[in-house]
Image: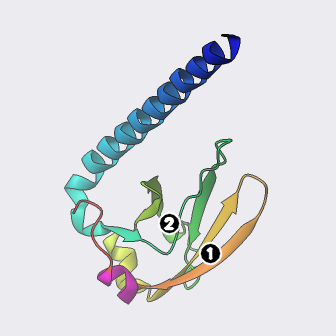
Amino acid sequence: MVFRTVSIFVLIWAFAEGFVANRQAQLVLDKMTAISASHANEWFALPQFTYHDSFYGYDVTYTPRFRSLAGFDMYDNATTSIVSQKLYIHIPLNVRDLVTEYQVTCEGREYETFVQNVTTSNLDQAPSKSA
């Protein structure tokens, strides 16, 4: 009897956790769609970057930096967001006109890092964030 009660509690807890996580993901998606709607042609998906969320909620933040414009603070950062296990990046059009290749450095909570180079031609082939 105790085992059955514990099992039912675990199932209810797991369902509630899944519902909350899905609701939070939908809220983020709604917010990102609202933000990107006015600049739809400036949002691009980078499917080669994935966000791995383990059972313990491990999260990764992405810090993009432009290699060819290093030192120019006004062009140094792009806005990123993680939605549905994909990294979405927003690069201002004036930056895209100047940069042919940029470097994204991904920094995790446990201090691990990896670097990925992406060309603007890859971005142009990627689907728009608002699509």
Q: Residues within 10 Å of mark 1 (few under 14, many from 20)?
A: few
Mark-to-mark CA distance, 1 and 2: 9 Å
Identify residue for label 2. 74
Regarding mark 2 in the picture, which secondary structure is present there? helix
Q: Nearer the viewer, residue 55 or 122?
A: 55
Regarding mark 1 in the picture, which secondary structure is present there? loop
Q: Which residues are magenta?
A: 121-125
Q: Position of residue 104 (x, y in %)?
A: 58, 73
Q: Specify whether 30 is left or right of 20.
A: left
Q: Specify whether 102 is left or right of 98.
A: right
> Residue 94 got which mark?
none
Q: Quadrant of the N terminus?
A: top right
Q: Specify whether 126 is left or right of 4.
A: left
Is 45 placed above or below 110 here?
below
Is 14 placed above or below 44 here?
above
Asked whether residue 122 is drawn in magenta, I would say: yes
Q: Position of residue 47 (x, y in %)?
A: 44, 72
Report the residue at 49% width, 70% height from top.
Answer: 75
Badge 2 amino acid: Met
Identify residue for label 1. 71
Q: Quadrant of the C terminus?
A: bottom left
Asked whether residue 129 is drawn in magenta, I would say: no
Is 70 placed above or below 31 here?
below
